[in-house]
Amino acid sequence: MSPNNITSESLDLPHVIYTPFTPKGEVTVPPSKSDVHRAIICAALSKGKCTLSPVALSNDIKATIGCIKALGAKAEIQGNTLTVDGTDLFSKKEALLDCGESGSTLRFFIPLAALGGVNAKFVGHGLLPQRPIGVFTEALPKAGVECKTEGGLPLEISGRLQSGKFEVPGNVSSQFITGLLFALPLLEKDSDIVLTSPIQSLSYINMTIYTMSRFGVDIETTDCGWHIKGGQRYTPCSYVTDGDWSHAAFFMVSGAVNGSVTVKGVKKNSVQGDKKIAELISKFGARVDWQKDYVTVESAPMKAITIDASQIPDLVPVLAVCASFAEGTTRIINAERLRIKECDRLKATAEMLNALGGKVRETADGLEITGVKSLKSGLVNGYNDHRIVMSAAACASKLEGKIECTYAMSINKSYPNFFEDYISIGGKANVIDLG
């Protein structure tokens, strides 16, 4: 076995080599993957024709487009505008839904297929077949939906979703709640989602509710969850998508560590929880100029802070990079759900930084990162996880030597043009095929 559990198979796949650079310049980030997922689904449910723009075709977004097509909708991309026609949604009563490696696609579409009474089979790739779906296999049979699974994917469902009371945990994934929120308003009677544990990643649910409201559907927040009035309808519209704050974070951290970067296309009034990256970088001590639709980050001496990651799990890997250059020991807490993402992201992040001379210790629910003056050469396991590969890129902004990172093309899951945008601010990314 190679260092950091790097398998011989992964060594045959394209790597990326990052070398030192000083970040400088401007970059415009792509539209939010989370926002685009939601807009596509609302557009299909509107049973009419909608335009969404801008849209970037990452692998996850392709999976969601593929699933609405499998259920009978039409979708066509021209430039960065996606036209969705949901007129024939649910016209197919049997469907194979390939969710790729997208947890969002899988968990959003299970209730949707049940809404349409579709006999559906769900499949996936990578680690998706192993990711939790038990929330649905427990809740949906009580609402008229039969689920057949041996614990993961493939999953087969049949029957038609019925309204009622849905008791779900809030600490596994907000994606289960979002999936129900999409479907339940279209049932004849009212429903309630009742939380059985404290909610995490609430901002993603708020994003869902906001997007649904733009298509004419209302959700009522209660003391213990959400009340969903039945008999509603999605209204077709032209939808302008939001810039991606989670992608902005990689460039912002690079600037905070060494240099100055302006990220455009991100709105200060965005409902995305990951916009908190601007506040956290400022708390570390970097200079942050946060305007209506851009943010500029400039390096300055940084000191350790404590970060509660319960509402911002996707930021943890790149925040750990930022912490590696902050004096003292930063503690990231309430991030235990990262162990069931595309990989165990707590383990992968610790391995990445330690392989480069960082000082990171895993805890049960997070990381403890002690700052260092710079990072050094090393071989990093990308674990086929886009956020690990892109976080490794941010390490190069204060580096002695080079970083060789496996699974370079995992960026296609969410940000196919990442390397080009990274190079535009001075980054050096050399993708090599070692096969």
Image (spheres, helix red, strand yellow):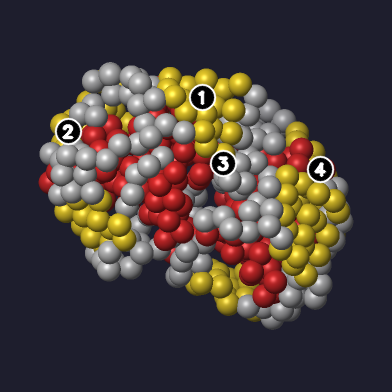
Q: Return the residue at label 1.
A: 83
The three-letter code of the residue at mark 3 reads: Thr
Determine the residue positioned at 85% across, 61% down: 259
**Residue bearing mark 3:** 241
How far apart are labels 4 and 1 at the CA level? 31 Å
Query: Which amino acid type is marked by label 2?
Result: Arg
Query: Measured along the vertical axis of the image, is residue 52 above or below residue 24?
Result: above
Callout 2 touching callout 3 (CB < 8 Å): no
Q: Is residue 321 above or below residue 303?
A: above
Q: Which mark is residue 160?
A: 2
Which badge, 3 or 4, comes first in the chain's sequence?
Answer: 3
Q: Secondary structure at mark 2?
A: loop
Marks 3 and 4 sit apart, C-alpha to C-alpha, by 25 Å
Q: Secondary structure at mark 3?
A: loop
The CA span between labels 2 and 1 is 28 Å
- Assign a secondary structure to mark 4: helix
Q: Give the residue at mark 4.
A: 423
